[in-house]
Image: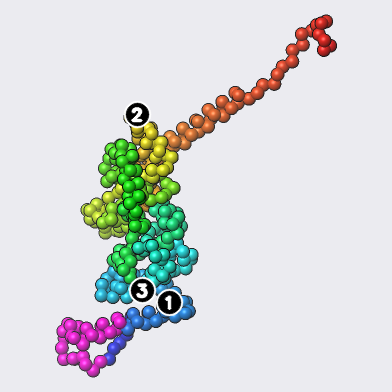
Amino acid sequence: VKGVIDSKDLPLNVSREILQQSRVSRIMRKQLVKRTLDTLKEVKGREDKKDYDTFWEAFGRNIKLGVIEDQDNRETLGNLLQFISSKSGDELTSLEDYVGRMPESQKAIYYIAADSKAIAETSPFVEDLLKRDLEILYLVEPIDEVCVANLAKFKEKELIDVSKEDLVLDDESEEAKKSSEEAAAEFKKLTEWMKETLGDKVERVVVSKRQTDSPCILVTSKGGWSANMEKIMRAQAMGDNRAMEYMRGKRILEINSGHPIIQSLKATCESASPDANAASMVALMYETSLLQSGFNIESPRDYGERVYEMIAAAAAASSSSSSAAGESEQVEAEVVDEGGKKDDPWK
């Protein structure tokens, strides 16, 4: 906002530096910010949403930057924010509208950061929430995640990143806690072996509490960067590699105890000592979860070799089954003429 203000109360016989610290200047500054925000709230509250949509398209990033930098007006600016969500279609939705649609049992506002809406809505992190019909905010601009992280809460509702560890969608009952403890004990041998196989690539391997269709997902610690933020920081031309290593979130592999692949690995681990094929399968699962979770693969060459080995094994199995099917085809019976016997009653 730019303009010229005329005031009779400003002293003119002092330097500009002293004038900027004048009590009158501070009051004027606060009043200008307040009136500007009041005008924006009035525009947002109109029945015709086109005016605010036009404003948001031009200055939406500035509002998000204000949430990051202006701590005094952060709550007011939070009311002006708009994002895409899983229930808004192609339209934008405000946090106030999101809270208004929340069921009583929902305790927090859930979001995920990604490069696009298409990637966000197909992420394994949102599978469980979509099954429960919970709304998720899709943060698709680089500034969005920093903005939401600084806002932290909106109307006493905490904003939670679904790609972080220890996601609890509702209050756990005693039965659910007992079931989780039993699953952790049942798969303890497998998780310990998987951690030993992956080494320093992951902080730990745990049994997931999320109901997903994927065999495993890779989450990050609450205090560190998400996969999307790590990607953004890597793209910075003047980024500090030492700070990146310090801020990068610890990676935790969550396995789906009900998935057939995990069940097969568990049986292999319990029946005998896992062989090289099982270790290769775990490595392939980890690298695939890296891609699904938004991380970069550490060694694309090794990943490609594992995929090609799997394709070759599947092709060999298909070829052998086709050969076996060909050999088992029925052969037509051959009629042999014995020259015709005199005692043959059929002749």
Q: Which residues fall within the magenta stretch? A: 7-34
Q: CA distance from mark 2 to mark 1?
A: 65 Å
Taking the spot 28% from the left edge, 56% from the top edge, the residue there is 222
Residue 11 can be seen, yes or no:
yes
What number is the disc on residue 52?
A: 1
The answer for how far apart the CA atoms under marks 1 and 3 are is: 13 Å
Amino acid found under the numbered disc labelled 2: Ala
Image coords of residue 81 (percent x, y) = 37, 71
Q: Earlier in the sequence, mark 3 or mark 2?
A: 3
Residue, disc 2? 272
Q: Amino acid at mark 3?
A: Asn
Residue 207 drawn at (x, y percent):
34, 45
Of 287 and 344, nearer the camera is 344
Task: Pick the quarter of the image with the N terminus.
Answer: bottom left
Q: In screen coordinates, is 336 left or right of 11?
A: right
The Cα atoms of the two marked residues, 3 and 2, are separated by: 58 Å
Report the predominant secondary structure element of the magenta stretch.
Answer: helix
Mark 1 Cα-neighbour bin, 10 Å: few <14, some 14–19, many ≥20:
some
Query: How crowded is the residue under tag 2: few (<14 C-alpha within 10 Å), some, or many (20+)?
Result: few
Picture residue at 39% right of the left edge, 65% below the top:
104
Looking at the image, is mark 1 or mark 3 nearer the viewer? 3
Q: Is residue 174 left or right of residue 259?
A: left
> Of callouts 2 and 1, which one flags the residue occurring earlier in the amino acid sequence?
1
In magenta stretch: residue 18:
yes
In-image side of 103 versus 333 (left or right)? left
Q: Is residue 302 magenta?
A: no
Q: Which of labels 2 and 1 is toward the front?
A: 2
Residue denoted by label 3: 79
Asked whether the beta carbons under mark 3 and mark 2 sit within 8 Å of each other, the answer is: no
